[in-house]
């Protein structure tokens, strides 16, 4: 299920946004102040962030902060404006979509439906799927190190290794997805090391056929979490009129 953060002190706007999100099966956390929104952004991962720029004190700064957030900088950002912030300014602050007040269900729906495909694509990119499987790393000096795969995403994996590896080193990686012909081989980087021989691996290069198989397998895992509405994966300006 996708999840969004709503920052608005406008109760009517929040009601409209919640109505649309419930219809689209998008969960939401609401914050009526900028400090609370910043706290949530620093603690949780969101697929979308909706910021009421003109009727919530400090909201533009939250939108600007979003694009530097470690875990949420790639979230879809919706800016709501009400005569003070221009469309251009909202885009410059980092918004992907701009919605002019008064909000209508139709206008909000068009924005979220257009963004839904993009949010799902990003969800698949960072989605960590638990997977009990074996993997093998070959270090730059040819030394094999076996490990147990803990979780897997499109961008990398976590492993529990049975031997040492070097942080930031480039390695060869080999593992299998639980599908016919699911062998994946990749050039990768050891991006973090933890206790008990835990390691984080970031993929650097995977052959196109193997990359496609990985993406399709993860997409099925993400989609199995719940139904997704139809959407058009494109950016639109849902503003009633340009300012």
Image: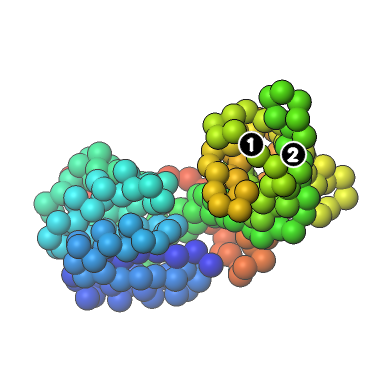
Mark 2 surroundings within 10 Å by alpha-carbon count, few (fewer than 14), some (14 through 19), many (20 or more): some
Q: From the viewer's side, name the closer residue of 131 and 148.
A: 148
CB atoms of marks 1 and 2 within 8 Å: yes
* First in sequence: mark 1 vs mark 2: 2
Q: Position of residue 85 (x, y in %)?
A: 15, 49
Residue 78 location, quadrant: bottom left
Q: Is residue 151 left or right of residue 90?
A: right
Q: Is residue 180 left or right of residue 242?
A: right
**Label 1 sits on residue:** 165
Mark 1 surroundings within 10 Å by alpha-carbon count, few (fewer than 14), some (14 through 19), many (20 or more): many
Q: Position of residue 74 (x, y in %)?
A: 42, 46
Residue at left offset 54%, top offset 31%: 168
**Label 2 sits on residue:** 145
Residue at the right extreme of this rendering:
180
Residue at left offset 45%, top offset 65%: 3
Residue 104 location, quadrant: bottom left
**Taking 70 as reference, is 33 above or below it?**
below
**Taking 82 as reference, is 86 above or below it?**
above
Residue at left offset 23%, top offset 53%: 62
C-alpha span from label 1 to label 2: 8 Å
Residue at left offset 19%, top offset 51%: 60
Helix, strand or loop at mark 1: loop
Q: Position of residue 15 (x, y in %)?
A: 30, 76
For residue 153, say whether it is visible: no
Q: Is residue 129 left or right of residue 108?
A: right
């Amino acid at each position: 299920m996708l999840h969004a953060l709503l920052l608005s002190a406008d109760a009517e706007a929040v009601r409209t946004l919640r109505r649309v999100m419930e219809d689209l099966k998008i969960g939401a956390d609401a914050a009526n102040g900028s400090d609370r929104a910043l706290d949530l952004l620093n603690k949780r991962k969101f697929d979308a962030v909706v910021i009421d720029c003109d009727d919530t004190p400090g909201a533009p700064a939250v939108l600007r902060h979003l694009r530097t957030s470690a875990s949420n900088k790639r979230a879809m950002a919706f800016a709501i404006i009400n005569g003070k912030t221009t469309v251009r300014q909202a885009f410059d602050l980092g918004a992907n979509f701009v919605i002019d007040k008064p909000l209508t269900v139709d206008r909000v729906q068009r924005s979220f439906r257009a963004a839904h495909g993009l949010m799902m694509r990003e969800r698949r990119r960072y989605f960590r799927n638990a997977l009990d499987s074996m993997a093998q790393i070959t270090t730059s000096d040819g030394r094999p190190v076996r490990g147990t795969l803990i979780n897997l995403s499109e961008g990398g994996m976590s492993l529990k290794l049975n031997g040492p590896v070097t942080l930031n080193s480039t390695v060869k990686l080999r593992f299998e997805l639980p599908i016919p012909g699911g062998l994946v081989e990749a050039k990768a980087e050891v991006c973090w090391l933890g206790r008990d021989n835990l390691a984080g691996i970031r993929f650097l290069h995977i052959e196109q056929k193997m990359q496609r198989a990985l993406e399709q397998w993860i997409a099925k895992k993400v989609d199995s979490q719940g139904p997704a509405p139809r959407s058009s994966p494109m950016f639109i300006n849902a503003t009633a009129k340009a300012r």
